[in-house]
Image (spheres, helix red, strand yellow):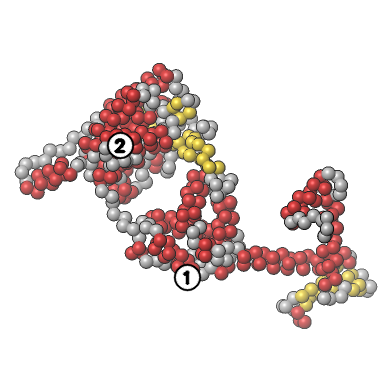
Amino acid sequence: MNGGINITENSDIELLKYIAESGIIDLTYVQEQVKMKKREEILKKHQYSIWFNEKENVWYSYLPDDSKANNRRKIKRKNKSDLQKVICDYYLSIEIGQAEEAKNKKLSIENLFYEFMKHKMNEVNSGTVKRMMSDWNRFYKPNKEFIAISVKNLTKINIDDFFNSVLATHELKKKAFYNMCGILKQTLEYAVDAEYIEKNPYRIKVNKKKFASSNKKPSVKEVFQAGEKELFINEMKRRLENNPSNTAPLAVMLDFELGTRKGEILAICKTDIVNNRIHIHRQLVEEFDTSDLNNIKSLGFRVVDYTKSEDGDRWLPLTAEAKRIIERIEKINKEYGYEYKDFLFVRDGHCISPDAVDAQVKRGCEHIGIPVKTMHKIRKTYASTLLHNGVNISIVKDMLGHADESTTLKHYIYNIEDSEETDHKVLNALEGSGKMKSDQSDQNIISFSGKRKARNLDKSKLPAL
């Protein structure tokens, strides 16, 4: 129409809102008129007559019902308007059901996943949401044909083909593969709970020979060997001398004595140190803005009053070296006026970030010319050193905060000797050229008895940094 305005349904709604808010029309009145028009249309299409029985003083009609004779059932109400309402409600419920059925038929795996994630965000932390979206974008999103399948039409064969294609395209270890599968599993469980589907077609039927090897990586890549450790710690000392106000190198050095997770060591407070032991019971975590799942942004780090698991709440013995490092940290904080609550590793009024210690480790390795390692590999070095020097695996497990020994043995124990020393020990053992000297720990670990219960320290939540 010449001079007319062509607007979409959404803009129609916005325009009506504007008109109503401006007082030009009464939006409630308009909505009532729309309902009345819909009601008139339904009653006009109603296939049965509506009549009044004077003897009974009630109004009658019929509604379709396949279970009754003549495929209809009689209904009655005292007032005609009440009878008409029953008729309208019946047909409206059918329309709504048909609309829901049509929606379900069109509901693709992709659309269902995003709906599920909106629900999931109420149950898990933002870091978990970020990891799930990372796996979705890496493994699911590129397979447009699969994620476009209607959930109603999804079959076990579709799932088999998809999982096998992922294994063929990506070199995945068993654990990484099953983590990836978990996204589809949870999404389809949600579909059942939301009553979009009655039966869950999820299953895993793949050629397991396609899994990437889960053999341990060489020790030289996973731990700091004896010679490397000495060079690396000396490099941390050099870096501290060049920048005496930066306690990040000291955090790295302290972790060789404690073997904590990166977030745990950065959340240590002075009050956590009692006599010759230190209480590990909180961690620094990164939080994210997940309001836009396709554009997740970091909000920074904050301290939380829990560790990765219940077993992570533990007491560790302090070596003499650990005590010296802590004293050095406190001296630097006092000298430069660094303070934030009671935390050890602070700067500019907040806790040091994990990125700061990661940078120290990376640059330190590069400077001394060894394979670049991480803070997590210092933790593995700590575990391997304890076992190497005769500490029972059960104690090593407790020191790391693991729930079971198998995790410790499978993922954290490596040979900390270089190849020359390893060959020397093996040859001595085989040739019987003399008794092998027992390994002596280079860490003066203070003895302790049993595992104490955590003290009742302040459990109040700490604000975001």
Give the mark nearer the N terminus: 2 vs 1: 1
Residue that badge 1 annotates: 157
- Which residue is at the far bottom? 70
Which structural element holds mark 1? helix
Q: Position of residue 84 (x, y in %)?
A: 85, 67
Quadrant of residue 439 within the rendered picture: top left
- Which residue is at the far left? 433
Q: Position of residue 112 (x, y in %)?
A: 57, 59
Q: CA distance from mark 2 to mark 1?
A: 49 Å
Asked whether, in this view, residue 284 is left or right of residue 393, the answer is right
The one of 363 and 321 positioned closer to us in this rendering: 363
Asked whether, in this view, residue 390 is left or right of residue 82, the answer is left
Q: Residue at x 44, y 19 (%)?
A: 337
- Which residue is at the far top? 335
Q: Residue at x 92, y 70 (%)?
A: 57
The one of 98 and 232 positioned closer to us in this rendering: 232
User: How many C-alpha atoms fall within 10 Å of the one at disc 2: few (<14), some, or many (≥20)?
Assistant: some
Give the answer, above or below, for where 285 lies relative to 144: above
Amino acid beneath label 2: Cys
Q: Residue at x 87, y 73 (%)?
A: 50
Q: Residue at x 25, y 44 (%)?
A: 220
Residue that badge 2 annotates: 365
Q: Position of residue 216 (x, y in %)?
A: 28, 51
Amino acid beneath label 1: Ile
Quadrant of residue 73 within the rendered picture: bottom right
Give the answer, above or below, for where 280 lies relative to 73: above
Q: Position of residue 163 (x, y in %)?
A: 44, 63
Give the answer, above or below, for where 90 lies relative to 368: below
User: Could one spot residue 355 in this view of the protein?
Assistant: yes
Which of labels 2 and 1 is toward the front? 2
